Amino acid sequence: MEYYAGIDVSLECSTVCVVDGSGKIIRETKVASEPAALIGWLGSLGFGLGRIGLEAGPLSQWLYAAMKQAGLAVELLETRHVRDAFKAMPVKSDRNDARGIAQLMRLGWFRPVHCKSMAAQEVRAILTARKLVQSKLLDVENSLRGILRGFGLKVGRTTRTNFAGRIRELVKGHPNLETIGKALLSVRAVLRGEFNAFEKQVRAMSRLNANARMLMSTPAVGPIVALTYASAIDDPARFRSSKRAGPLFGLTPKKHQSGETDRSGRISKIGDTAVRAALYEAAHIILTKPIKGCSRLKSWAMRIARRAGMSKAKVALARKLAVILHRMLADATPFNAAAAAA
């Protein structure tokens, strides 16, 4: 008889449920959320497991990689799919979640997701940290502008270099505002220094990463877009077709068909938000800036803009870029303007 296991992962302890082929619960327990503990407990069952399910989450990729290396038949499940499957549960608990995952594995009603390599996860961690520092830097600057505006002190347009001088000029003669300005400018200086360090590191990484260098041969694709996309794809061979890149990042429209109703909605916006934003920014630059080497691609998007509007044209171009960039990774070839337009 086949046996299946579901694991609901938490920070300290994970809840494990094992069921047989008929759905009967065989074992239930809580195990420390450590690879050695989970592998040891599953190995002590005395029988093999046909499938083991883990919901994708912060710890799941780490546990999945270790269990896969140990030779276990483990699957990483898409969070959205699992959440929708559990909507009928009147009571949500770790125990019920583990039971539900085990039943999904038994029935085969699950959607596996790709577990990124450690190198891809490290690249993504750097990009996430850079984005966090950038957002906090903007928060500090906007907070300073807002505080001074309440006293009729308008900062106006500034550059990175003269922002601090403009703030000091405005708060001069206001003791309390001078204290606020000095403190927040000190925080800004630290954040600016760390952000510049991240910028240098990202550019160095893009030069050393062969996939990123190849992707940067595409117009409007710089280090950030290239590294974000390459780390999200990780392994191009996991796609049967490059056209799957559009739906993966939520750049294809939703569809609702039932009886006489058949309508298409807005894009689904599922998948990696960072990749979707990066591709949209690249499409925006192609359509609004004089970029060389993409005249045919721009003409294709502008025809859509005249028919459906600029916003939809940017989304369509972002989806096309997703397909083009995947094909470049799969074939290990640089950007070809003629092929991209076709």
Image (tube, helix red, strand yellow):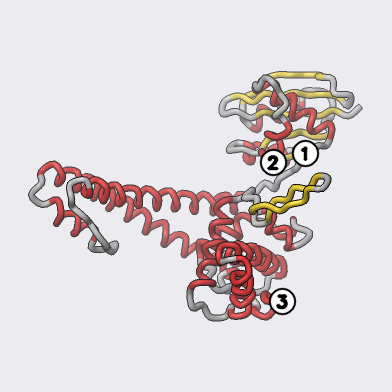
Quarter-of-image position of residue 54 = top right
Residue flagged by tag 3: what amino acid is it? Ala
Pointers 1 and 2 in contact (C-beta within 8 Å): yes
Can you say which quadrant of the picture contains the N terminus? top right
Badge 1 is on which residue? Answer: 110
Q: In this view, does 137 lie to the left or right of 339?
A: left
Per the model, the C-alpha gap separating discs 3 and 2 is: 34 Å
Q: Are marks 1 and 3 in contact (CB under 8 Å)?
A: no
Q: Does 148 appear above or below 210? A: above
Q: Is residue 60 visible?
A: yes
Residue at label 2? 78
Where residue 337 sits in the image (x, y, percent)? 64, 79
- Along the viewing direction, whichever of 328 and 274 lies nearer the viewer: 274
Residue 342 disc label: 3
* Label 1 vs 3, first from the N-terminus: 1
Q: Which mark is in front, 1 or 3?
A: 3
